[in-house]
Image: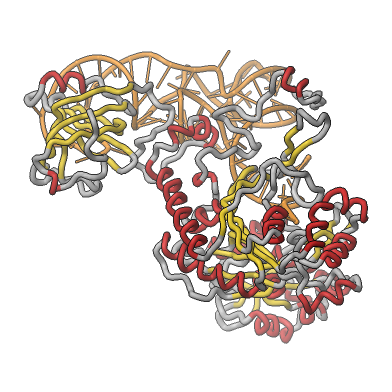
Amino acid sequence: MKRTHNCGALGLNDIGNTVSLSGWVDRRRDLGGVIFVDLRDKHGKTQVVFNPEHNTKVHQIADQLRNEYVISIKGVVQKRPEGMENPKLKTGMIDVRVDELEILNESENPPLAINDPKELARENDELRLKYRYLDLRRPWIQKNLFLKSRFLKEVHHFFNKNEFEEIETPVLCKSTPEGARDYLVPSRVHPGKFYALPQSPQQYKQLLMIAGVDRYYQIAKCFRDEDLRADRQPEFTQIDVEMSFVDQNAVIELFDSFVTEVIGKVWDFEPPTTIRRMPYTEAMLKYGSDKPDLRFDLEIKDVTELAGHTDFGVFNNVYKSGGKIRGLAAKGCVDFTRKQIDELTEYVGRYGAKGLVWMRVKEGGEVETQVAKFFTLEQLHSFKEALEAEASDMMFFIAGPEKIAATAMGQLRLEIARIKGLLDPKKREFVWITEFPMFEYSESEDRYVSMHHPFTSPMPEHLEAMLNGDLKNCKAEAYDLVLNGVEIGGGSIRIHKPEIQEKVFRLLGLTAEQVQENFGFFVDAFKYGAPPHGGLAFGLDRIIASLEGQESIRDFIAFPKNTSASSPMDHSPSAIDISQLQDLHISINAPSKN
RNA sequence: GGGGUGGUGGCUCAAUUUGGUUAGAGCACCGGCCUGUCACGCCGGAGGUUGCGAGUUCAAGCCUCGUCCAUCCCGCCA
């Protein structure tokens, strides 16, 4: 029985036609006589009808049908009787009176309720991942995967149009010490040696620029062996891009048009033709984050000078030790209960804040706070002015080292927005964050490390200072694209002068020998005429999840791993045969469990 | 590595302030009835080592300790 239509296709125009459909039994409704079956495939559902008066034999076979049986039917499209239409179904004006039925395959009672009528029905993640092939039958999750497919088609179209070449880079690479932990692949041919899976194709794409490719892109799988989150998988996909003879402005402008032409098209909305840009310092000050959510205001203010010169010990101690005091006026939050404030205090504590100072702005404008005795009326009033707080607002303050004061306040800002329902899922606020610090100090390694990566170019105006060893204030020509508080992409202009690259390695504490050993081929390549170049990479899964208003990227990946980087379905990773290990010259020295 | 939450029939959950008969419900499943339903309806049935292991107690799904797993977060993720 060859199918003539899919399960989402039939309508009033097909009435009277003989058709053949194939699909899964979504649900069977047996009324004793007539049996209705909702037949489901990728495209939708169609109701098919088995009437004993019309065809006794077929009706008897239909009696055996159960959820998730795979069947083919042949029958005649008929208009549903008056009042029996189902407006919830695209095909709800018609149904198919079945003349022939073939059961292609039976199904055991499925462990997941694939036909659960609740939108976005989901069991716990472990079960869903174990039976992922069933989970993926659900229309809502198929929608996610097909959306990604459609998006990628537009992505390819965009890069083709703009004269980019799609070039593959190796998955078996050289391990390098900078950055995330590598996934390693042992070499059979070279005992004791390992490949690394790429954290990104960074060095290869730069080498392609040196090779004269001019414009490169790739839908690239990347691997990082770090602890996972809802928005982090051990393997993930980047839209990886690199361009020659460009400056930062050229890259950003091209990807402004990428947002307009590709993202705006697939998601059917009109992004601004020019996406706003915000320096890193401003983002950290006003929003306490390098990926600010700009769907709402709640701007953070610096009150270090004001608060530092009060008699309040918490404030002036922080002030004396060089910390910062940041404040925020939570609009309309004057009625937060003590319990809510305690919860918020605990919440900011996760981000290192030692405490949370609050002040209520009452109806008449007077300020009410538990710590009133430490301040003069004038000081309380000036806090109100500084935060632009009005009656019915709650003022919050966090004091501490700059990074903690900023990020804890940034998180508080987000949490208040969640409580007040300010995170409009329909809004899409893009922003480029620019002028990132070139270096940041790593406590664990007791040295400066690259904030982006070691190939990032300093801003031209900071080059001189950097060469003189001023790492703290050196800014990089790096940029991140942020959407609704999610970093969806990032990149930089790269260093193309070998002597500057050498110097950066040196500033990062790498010796000439270490550079030679780890990056020798890369550094060498720059000696033979490297063009100025730069690029960026988008996190494919994050873009889509974010545009769909989801925080977890798992529902956008066909076969994701769980939080311990394993797959309940195929049980990877798994132990392997001893002979395989012997081939690889590896012996296991694992800590014993249980 | 650390913290929060959770683990009870196939699934989603409940189990009385503070431990007390035979651990319940909905969905799914099986049987019966039902000829226009669409989350069909009605009647009946089966299905449980309450993650695992100790402990406290006359008595533990509930309290304590340990452990495993899941999930969210911090660290980490150039």
Residue pictured at 74% horizontal, 41% vertical: A196
Q: Return the residue nearer the eye: A294 or A372.
A: A294
Residue A210 x/y as whole percent: 71, 61
Could you say which quadrant of the image residue A321 lies in?
bottom right
Q: Is residue A255 left or right of residue A186?
A: left
Residue beneath the point at 79% across and 55% down: A522
Vertically, is A407 above or below A68?
below
A314 relative position to A409: left or right: right
Task: Say which quadrant the C terminus of chain A sits in.
Answer: top right
Is any atom of residue A472 visible in this view? yes
Q: Nearer the viewer, residue A116 or A501?
A: A501
Q: Relative to A372, does residue A234 appear above or below in the rendering? A: above
Q: Quadrant of residue A110?
A: top left
Quarter the N terminus of chain A occupies: top left
Q: Residue at x 20, y 19 (%)?
A: A61
In the rendered view, tell whether residue A289 sits above or below residue A178.
below
Where is residue B78 shown, x and y percent of the image? 75, 56
The outermost residue toward the bottom is A378
Q: Position of residue A546 (x, y in %)?
A: 52, 57
Q: Relative to A553, does residue A267 appear above or below in the rendering?
A: below
Colouring chosen for the image of the structure? secondary structure
Residue found 61% across the figure and 56% down from its top: A240
